[in-house]
Amino acid sequence: MTDATSPARPALGRTEFIALMAMMVATIAFSVDAMLPALPEIADELTPEAPTLAQFILTSFILGMGVGTLIVGPASDTLGRKPVILAGAALYVAGAIMAYFAPTLELVIVARVLQGLGASGPRVVSLAMIRDLYSGRQMASIVSFVMLIFTLFPAVAPLMGTAIIAGLGWRGIFLAFLLFSVVSVAWLMIRQPETLPPAARRKLSASDLMAGFGEAIRHPQMYLSIIVQGLIFGALFGTISSIQQVFDMTYGRAEGFPVYFFAIAVCAMWAAPTNAKLVLKLGMRPIIRAALAAQVGFASLMLAILLTGILGDAEFWAYFAWSVTCFAMLGFTIGNLNALALEPLGHIAGMASALMGAVATVAGAVIGGTIGQLYDGTVVPLAASVLVLCAAAWLFMRRMPREASDR
């Protein structure tokens, strides 16, 4: 008999398992990035007097997802992984239907919170499923390949959103969300066996929850990973929240935005497979620190370019290149941080993943939403914010304990 830390390998082959887990996680990318080309139309229709409020359609989803992780993680440790993903998908679909019919921005935002709550199931539980089957650098490698497929959706989602808007209007995007969820969950239910056997499940009680959360949050690899992820997510969500307005209002390239966004994501895709290879040799901590240090340098250079105006009309291409580095940074950090945090906590992987996802995501949403609202027609507030956040993350990473395989 096996336990939650080292159960039998999945019936699926490695490639199909990675693809399935990536599609689960890609629910988030699709739910956020497909909305980007719709923001101007939503603002014109629902909040013409304050167009930046349309950004809350993105951050409300992220906020709901962060809160939902606190529920679905512990629930998956008790009920199993697959039932919790199915319940989350039901909430996600309900939110999509509500948003499709919502007559006001406020109701769309409420529906997006509901969608976020539902998406927390696939997001958190898929990570717990990976931890059920792998650990340490092997887990980091698997998550890196998941991130590779995950990055494809930011590349194509705005293009898909633009096509859907052209045919069905911006509300049609919510129908696409519904279809995506049904297909991905059906794949999981049909093909992937449950990864958490009944013998390894934990009782769900207030005392057990508090003990589990207490054990997780006291571990240095966990709480430092949460802090660093929160700072990185803040930089990412701030970038995503303002990117459509930057292309439109700052550089006058609104019509080409989906294509440019596609190019940014494609150019950043190399990071995940590169990390998957390097992490097996170098370990997780050195790669995370190097990626954060590099981004501090890139953000400093971008800020200098913006403040001096030295590039003139070519400044757009500097912003484009810098955006690629922001997205590439994720491939070298998030998967490694998840693996570091869960390495010593495999026996409570769902709960630990929930705690990490909730705190880091909510913190990132609050930070990113604030950065988005700082938009003043230039990229200066964003570049300065990313610089500060990544510098702080690098300092916290210096305190991260060594992974077990390095001891």
Image: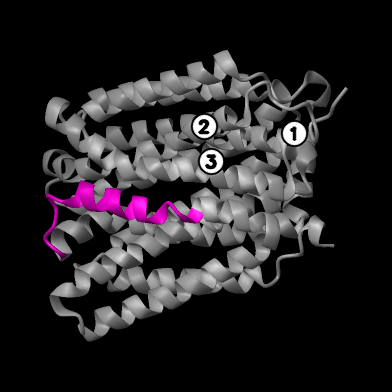
Identify which amino acid the numbered label 3 is placed on: Val
Q: Mark 3 points at which residue?
A: 146
Mark 3 vs mark 1: in front: 3
Q: Mark 2 points at which residue?
A: 19
* Residue 226 spot, x, y in % from top left: 62, 56
Q: In which quarter of the image is residue 352?
A: top right
Identify which amino acid the numbered label 1 is placed on: Ala
Q: Earlier in the sequence, mark 1 or mark 2?
A: 2
Front-most of residues 383 and 195: 195
Instruction: Judge whether residue 120 can be spotted in this image.
Output: no
Q: Give the range drawn in magenta.
A: 251-271
For the stretch drawn in magenta, what is the main secondary structure? helix
Front-most of residues 46 and 168: 168
* Residue 371 spot, x, y in % from top left: 35, 62
Front-most of residues 368 and 333: 333
- Name the residue at 53% across, 28% down: 20
Relative to 380, residue 239 above or below: above
* Quarter placement of the C terminus: bottom right
